[in-house]
Amino acid sequence: MFDESLRRISDRLDDSAEVLDVGGWARPLNRADWVLDLMPYESRGMLGHDGPGEERFREDRWVTRDICAHEPWPFDDGFFDFAVCSHTLEDVRDPVWVCAELQRVARAGYIEVPSRLEEQSWNVQGPWVGWGHHHWLIDVDRAGLSFVFKPHLLGALPGSAFEPGFAQALPPTDRVSILLDTGKAHHSPGEPSETFETAPQGVVLDTPEQIRARAAAIEEQAVRTKAMPLGNLTRMTQEERERLGAWIDQGARIP
């Protein structure tokens, strides 16, 4: 991770914040209280550590498991104040599942992946295109992340790779893509957000009338699919979802 990214993360976290590092085995984040990785605690730190100070996590807070197994990670919704996933998504077989679980268990977070400028350049790791062990080409923008499978024959496809020396001439900041979600999501068009410039799809839920008008959509997103609140930033509990569903079933009456 970049020093500037580490500083920004450190500045926004107080000492009581619970932090998760996903896929941090090779270079764990010292500030993390928990680490989730396929590899064991005993062999951690092959590439050093990220961040100053000593490790905050302990062996009993190092969870060894396949992060892509389609089983929920062993944490409640919104358990963490912040999660970090740095240079991991490009390696795993199901990054979409990992992103979904990141959103579920953490109220904010940081993702860092190789940029397509680097991943589609010759001679980054050897006489081939990009990193040989990476499975995905990843785009990052304000809408989120998108994943395109990276075939091994990428270098043989016309127009699919930058010429030798291109990546080496890039500044370090162009060789990675970063998504920082501060957890400051807003639904009012007049309130700025680091996550959204405007309310997603123009949906505003500031008044009783607006809430009643969208009761069916709220039930679908917050009760049935649990897709909202986004990343469960507000730590909505199952009991609260059930109460919301019962209120909507009874006609969504607002005094």
Image (tube, rainbow, N blue to C red):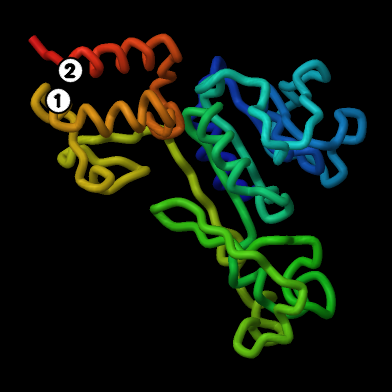
Percent of width and height locating residue 80: 55, 23
**In this rendering, position of residue 159 left or right of residue 227:** right
Residue found at x 58% / y 47% = 96
Please name the residue that numbered disc 2 is placed on.
Answer: 252
Percent of width and height locating residue 159: 60, 88
Label 2: few (<14), some or many (≥20) within 10 Å?
some
Residue found at x 55% / y 27% = 105
Residue found at x 21% / y 40% = 203
Q: CA distance from mark 2 to mark 1?
A: 6 Å
SS category of the residue bearing label 2: loop
**Residue 212 badge:** 1
Q: Amino acid under label 1?
A: Arg
Percent of width and height locating residue 253: 13, 14
* Contact? badges 2 and 1 (CB < 8 Å): yes
**In this rendering, position of residue 153 left or right of residue 229:** right
Q: Amino acid under label 2?
A: Ala
When asked about the image quadrant of residue 48, the answer is: top right
Quadrant in which the C terminus appears: top left
When asked about the image quadrant of residue 241, the answer is: top left
**Residue 13 badge:** none
When asked about the image quadrant of residue 28, the answer is: top right
Q: Residue farthest to the right?
A: 42
Q: Mark 2 or mark 1, which has the lower sequence index?
A: 1
Label 1: few (<14), some or many (≥20) within 10 Å?
some
Closer to the camera in the image, 174 or 206: 206
**Above or below for 105 versus 242:** below
Residue found at x 24% / y 41% = 192
SS category of the residue bearing label 1: helix
**Above or below for 249 versus 65:** above
Percent of width and height locating residue 174: 56, 66
**Above or below for 162 versus 149:** below
**In this rendering, position of residue 61 left or right of residue 248:** right
